[in-house]
Amino acid sequence: MTEAEAIEYQRFLDQKLAELMEHFDTVQIVVTRHNKASDTTNMMAKGAGNIYARVCSLEAWLRDIKI
């Protein structure tokens, strides 16, 4: 991912985070993108609201995953 792409994606995540925060108390966004140039996966995350609620929500989500 180029620096310009990373800036564009961060702006996009900021916009979506703001939109979601209009409706919810806490939001945690985690996204991944395959980087074909380096054959790696890039991860980006953004969140807002009570950090404890966000962490507990993620822990609950991890417990419920059926792989």
Image: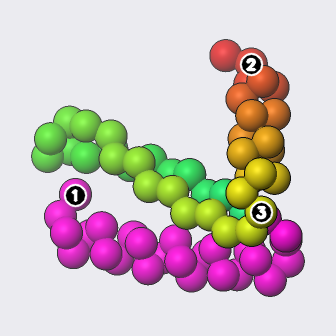
Q: Amino acid at mark 1?
A: Met
Observer able to see residue 2: yes
Identify the residue shown where x is 71% and y is 57%: 51
In the depicted structure, whether residue 58 falls above or below residue 24? above
| Secondary structure found at label 2 | loop
Residue 20 lies within the magenta run: yes
Residue under label 2: 66
Q: Amino acid at mark 2?
A: Lys
Res 44 quadrant in image: bottom left
Residue under label 1: 1
Query: Which quadrant is home to the C terminus?
Result: top right
**Region of the chain picked out in magenta, as a range:** 1-26
Residue under label 3: 50
Query: Which quadrant is home to the N terminus?
Result: bottom left
Q: Which mark is in front, 2 or 3?
A: 3
Q: Amino acid at mark 3?
A: Asn
